[in-house]
């Protein structure tokens, strides 16, 4: 295995092979099986462009051979920062087929993150668009090349700067088919070698690099696809950033290709674009995230304008979707809601399409693989009984045993017996897990613990509220109190008195009531489409500090006025 990675112990690797969890094929070989089975079927749709499986396979081979001829070597790391497009799919498979390891950056990452990825991975190449949303990636690449000694190649979709390569030109170079086949066959890695690296969420500090092998990633995309109803007839609408773990392989577009379905790439996340594509392409599944779900549910589009009857399911991941919004999804879109909970480090849980309403609306899911092991523990790492809250830990055939080149993080994140510490506070009831929040997403009000997500779900039931996020704010007496940040629906008003009156009707404990309301137009969102709660905590802490400073200057003045009177 690649140096500076932590392999699975031999006894676990042997068990996973014996159980059939690891197939000992590579990610490109998984796709090639589908190409042989469905050569003429449409694999990708984007705008008016339709690409068959056989066309996709030919493009991958030509680009992979181009990488070989440009000097990329087996196990070279390549920072990969392309936006949603067929070119992302082609380049992703081509790098792996050439023996290189893509490091999956997101389009929103900038100099700090990309420089960190290049340095940490000792990357030799960088794949980018030329310009996207007004940002010139070529300029950033040129600047990084001056300070990153390992970086030797920059490949650009579009017009490269001098010294950079035109990525798409690799598809048009003259080749000898036999030589290409022989060169690519020689690059086939062992299936337990690292195939790619995804990045951690990065909600605290710089993201860590998560090495994923061919064996573990294929098992993950296939089992999560099977758990959520993937099949050869599915039409999957891609709206999330495809380089992120969930839309990449959990089950993501790799799951679509494993089952022989069709991938439709949306031009935007706007409700009009999404709904019209569902109608036009007869989409059967959409995977999304909490901010997008909220926007679609609150879009001012009359019901019935678009024919959404083809939609079988909508799956949301990245953060827990409140039960109230799950109910609204099923009522609005007439489809089954699937909750996806997991981590780029491995463990994935899903609710199932045939679960009863109560499970679909409240649970965070159950593991997708029979090889998954989970436990819920207290602060002393002792398992707690069902129904008692504790931290979730996971181990299994697709959960890593360590980050890449990061022993300090490994010591914190993994137990001595190989379980990954998720950092999520959950309750386990039977086969299902119920997330109560992250450790840092609990408000400790004088010793009373308040689940932010529980309170958010109650707030979301109010008809004026489009979205809500509850965070801890500092308090001199209790240490922390709860502050509710709220985005309102159009043409609605909402006061703190309205908030408290409504929550009292929900019959929650009074200590859980928010003690401040902040109305905002939007929430800060990470590159991985997660609400940055830490930024909201900073915002409210700064606001309280400023108010205290103002009050300290006013109090003496009031006293003097009183004396003068």
Image: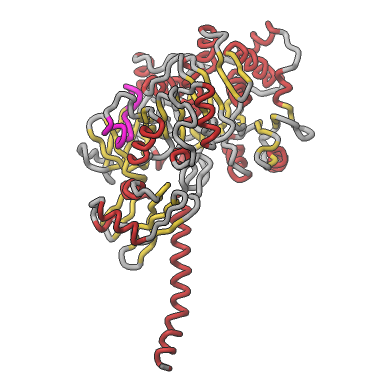
408 lies above or below 78: below
Q: Position of residue 131 (x, y in %)?
A: 69, 37
42 lies above or below 152: above
In the rendered image, the residue lying farthest to the bottom is 564
In the rendered image, the residue lying farthest to the right is 162
What residue is drawn where x is 44% and y is 51%?
Answer: 488
Residue 405 in view (yes/no): no
213 lies above or below 175: below
Q: Quadrant of the C terminus?
A: bottom left
Left or right: 183, with 324 as reference point: right
In the rendered image, the residue lying farthest to the left is 385
Q: Position of residue 42 (x, y in %)?
A: 56, 15
* Numbered disc total: 0
Left or right: 380, with 115 as reference point: left
Left or right: 118, with 222 as reference point: right
Identify the magenta region: 357-372
Q: Position of residue 407 (x, y in %)?
A: 46, 39
Q: Position of residue 369 (x, y in %)?
A: 35, 23
The quadrant in which residue 123 appears is top right
Q: Looking at this view, is 152 or 11 the one in front?
A: 152
């Amino acid at each position: 295995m690649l140096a500076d990675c932590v392999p699975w112990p031999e006894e676990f690797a042997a068990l996973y092979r014996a159980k059939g969890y690891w197939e000992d094929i590579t990610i490109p070989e998984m796709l090639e099986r589908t190409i042989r089975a469905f050569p003429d079927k449409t694999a990708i749709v984007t705008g008016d462009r339709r690409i068959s499986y056989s066309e996709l396979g030919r493009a991958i081979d030509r680009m992979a051979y181009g990488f070989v001829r440009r000097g990329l070597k087996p196990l070279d790391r390549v920072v990969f920062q392309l936006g949603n497009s067929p070119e992302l799919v082609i380049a992703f498979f081509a790098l792996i087929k050439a023996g290189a390891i893509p490091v999956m950056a997101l389009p929103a990452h900038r100099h700090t993150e990309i420089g960190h990825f290049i340095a940490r991975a000792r990357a030799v190449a960088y794949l980018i668009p030329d310009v996207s949303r007004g940002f010139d990636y070529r300029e950033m690449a040129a600047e990084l090349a001056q300070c990153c000694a390992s970086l030797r190649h920059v490949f650009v979709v579009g017009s490269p700067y001098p010294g950079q390569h035109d990525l798409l030109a690799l598809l048009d170079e003259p080749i000898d088919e036999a030589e290409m086949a022989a060169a690519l066959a020689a690059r086939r890695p062992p299936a337990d070698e690292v195939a790619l690296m995804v990045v951690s969420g990065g909600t605290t500090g710089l993201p860590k690099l998560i090495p994923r092998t061919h064996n573990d990633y294929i098992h993950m995309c296939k089992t999560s696809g099977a758990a959520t109803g993937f099949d050869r007839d599915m039409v999957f609408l891609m709206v999330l950033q495809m380089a992120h773990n969930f839309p990449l392989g959990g089950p993501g577009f790799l799951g679509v290709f494993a089952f022989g379905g069709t991938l439709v790439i949306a031009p935007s996340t706007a409700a009009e674009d999404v709904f019209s594509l569902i109608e036009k392409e007869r989409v059967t599944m959409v995977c999304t995230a909490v901010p997008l779900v909220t926007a679609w549910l609150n879009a001012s589009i009359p019901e019935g304008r678009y024919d959404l009857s083809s939609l079988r399911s909508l799956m949301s991941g990245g953060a827990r979707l409140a039960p109230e919004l799950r109910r609204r999804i099923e009522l609005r879109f007439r489809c089954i809601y699937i909750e996806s909970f997991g981590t780029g480090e491995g463990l994935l849980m899903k609710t199932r399409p045939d679960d009863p309403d109560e499970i679909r609306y409240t649970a965070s899911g159950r593991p997708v693989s029979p090889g998954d092991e989970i436990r819920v523990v207290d602060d002393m790492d002792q398992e707690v009984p069902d129904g008692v809250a504790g931290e979730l830990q996971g181990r299994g055939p697709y959960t890593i045993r360590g980050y890449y080149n990061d022993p300090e993080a490994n010591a914190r994140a993994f137990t001595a017996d190989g379980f990954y510490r998720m950092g999520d506070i959950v309750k386990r009831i039977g086969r299902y897990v119920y997330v109560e929040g992250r450790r840092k997403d609990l408000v400790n009000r004088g010793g009373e613990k308040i689940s932010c997500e529980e309170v958010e779900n109650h707030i979301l039931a109010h008809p004026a509220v489009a979205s809500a996020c509850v965070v801890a704010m500092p308090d001199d007496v209790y240490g922390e109190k709860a502050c509710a940040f709220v985005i309102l629906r159009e043409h609605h008003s909402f006061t703190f008195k309205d908030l408290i009156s409504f929550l009292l009707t929900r019959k929650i404990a009074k200590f859980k009531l928010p003690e401040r309301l902040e109305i905002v137009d939007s929430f800060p969102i990470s590159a991985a489409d997660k609400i940055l709660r830490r930024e909201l905590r900073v915002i409210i802490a700064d606001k309280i500090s400023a108010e205290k400073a103002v009050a300290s200057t006013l109090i003496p003045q009031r006293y003097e006025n009183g004396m003068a009177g």
